[in-house]
Image: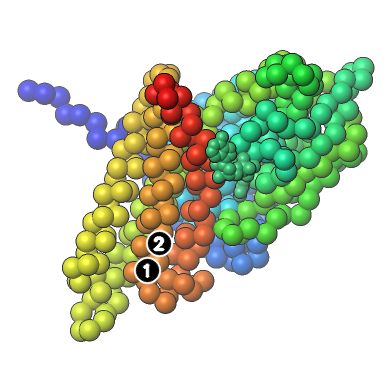
Amino acid sequence: MTAKLMTTPFGEDHELFRQQCRRFVEKELAPHAGEWEEKKGFPSEVFRRVGEMGYHGVLIPEEYGGAGEDYLMAAVWCEEMARIGSGGVSAGLGMHALIVLPAINRFGNEEQKKRLLLPAVRGEKIGALGLTEPVAGSDLASIRTLARREGDHYILNGSKTFITNGNRADFVLVLCKTDPGTGYKGFSILIVEKGMPGFLQGKPLEKLGWHAGDTAELTFENVAVPVANRLGEEGMGFYNAMANLEWERLIMALGTVHGAQLAFDKTRTYILQREAFGRPIGKFQVNRHKMVDMAVEIEAARQLNYHALRKLVNGEECAREVSLAKIFAAKMGDYVATNCLQLHGGYGYMREYEIERFFRDVRINSIGGGTSEILKEIVGRIMGL
Ligand SMILES: Cc1cc2nc3c(=O)[nH]c(=O)nc-3n(C[C@H](O)[C@H](O)[C@H](O)COP(=O)(O)OP(=O)(O)OC[C@H]3O[C@@H](n4cnc5c(N)ncnc54)[C@H](O)[C@@H]3O)c2cc1C
């Protein structure tokens, strides 16, 4: 007899962790999402509370205060964050815990890890990642931020934009050029810390979605950054910034699918309650079919994600699978948001119903973390095209 096959990549431990995350999110974060969206910001206290729960440290070894878990456990936290119902909050928490801290853990030296990871895992210090510049996003090799070595410091000049957690970050991993003219080997990553003279953190930018999120411009005017704050080797910055891209992209796809599933579930409830022409609107065949069409897309996106996640966890090459998953999830998210909003009629257009927020928030997924066009270029190259 054939052994029973696993239907998801997750085991019993992951599902127990999921229940714990879900209880926390539903009790302590989701009830405030509407207020934080209206106020266009969420308190830094949220980072500390999430730190107390241990979630920032999911990928960080125990010696630096974390839980030392793998990508599967982190994927669970990532999925459950979608239940907050505010892309801006989950993006801020996710950027800190799932992107910035693992980069320090991977490339940092002992002093940097002790000094930054321990308080960051507790949520007492908040991290950000500064790659994008006003003049260069997709084409990162064209960034202009420049660090000139002077003794035991780098003198940093330039600017970054669209930086998640940028306004309140206590430290930012800044990709810059240390040796322009030497191609990909001319980049380094510097850890720029709040309060360093010449480091300016702009106010959160006004956005279509992610209203509770802090997305800011950063400016560096002759900032003297100690050489001890360089993350990884000089000249390895570009490679190190790209080293975890598959995971960083998959995070967005996982969040998109979970968010779409929630919007779908809310819509299902709504269309069974709302009546028109003497029956629930969900009982019209056209709407029933619309729901099934959405279910197909969500399920397909979920399976693409899990296929890519399995390969990532196995340590296999997965640039193609992750790119396909993110491209598909982003398209699916827009499609599901449009249809769920339509099924809510006028109420879908109202702030009061979370479908409106999902519709705005989900739009980022084909832009952030590598646009769908750039991902198609990657897959095209892999295909030999
Ligand atoms: C809310 C938000 C949060 C963000 N957070 C962060 C963050 O924390 N840290 C960070 O560093 N960045 C962050 N970003 C930046 C994000 O990663 C970039 O916006 C993204 O990489 C695209 O870069 P760009 O905006 O410069 O667009 P561009 O690169 O100017 O692209 C514009 C358009 O041209 C297309 N295009 C570009 N090159 C090609 C090509 N070769 N072939 C076909 N089409 C092409 C793109 O696909 C896109 O449609 C964030 C962005 C947003 C909106």
- Whole-percent x, y for residue 25 in the image: 48, 52
Q: Residue at x 41, y 48 (%)?
A: 331
Question: Count the marks: how many?
Answer: 2
- Amino acid type for the residue under numbered disc 2: Thr
From what the image shows, is residue 262 above or below residue 226? below
Q: Which residue corresponds to mark 2?
A: 338
In this rendering, would 206 be left or right of 230? Answer: left
Answer with the quarter of the image where residue 8 lies.
Answer: top left
- Amino acid type for the residue under numbered disc 1: Gln
Q: Residue at x 73, y 22 (%)?
A: 188
Q: Nearer the viewer, residue 9 or 315?
A: 315
* Proximity of marks 2 and 1: CB atoms separated by less than 8 Å: yes
Answer with the quarter of the image where residue 300 lies.
Answer: top left
Q: Nearer the viewer, residue 163 or 272?
A: 163
Q: Which residue corresponds to mark 1?
A: 342
For the N terminus, give its image quadrant: top left
From what the image shows, is residue 168 above or below residue 221? below
In this rendering, would 197 be left or right of 328? Answer: right
Label 1: few (<14), some (14–19) or many (≥20) C-alpha neighbours in 10 Å: some
Mark 1 sits near ligand 1, with its Cβ under 8 Å away: no
Q: Secondary structure at mark 2?
A: helix
In this rendering, would 1 be left or right of 372? Answer: left
Residue 109 in sight from this viewpoint: no
- Whole-percent x, y for residue 198 in the image: 89, 40
Q: Nearer the viewer, residue 303 or 178?
A: 178
Q: Residue at x 41, y 21 (%)?
A: 384
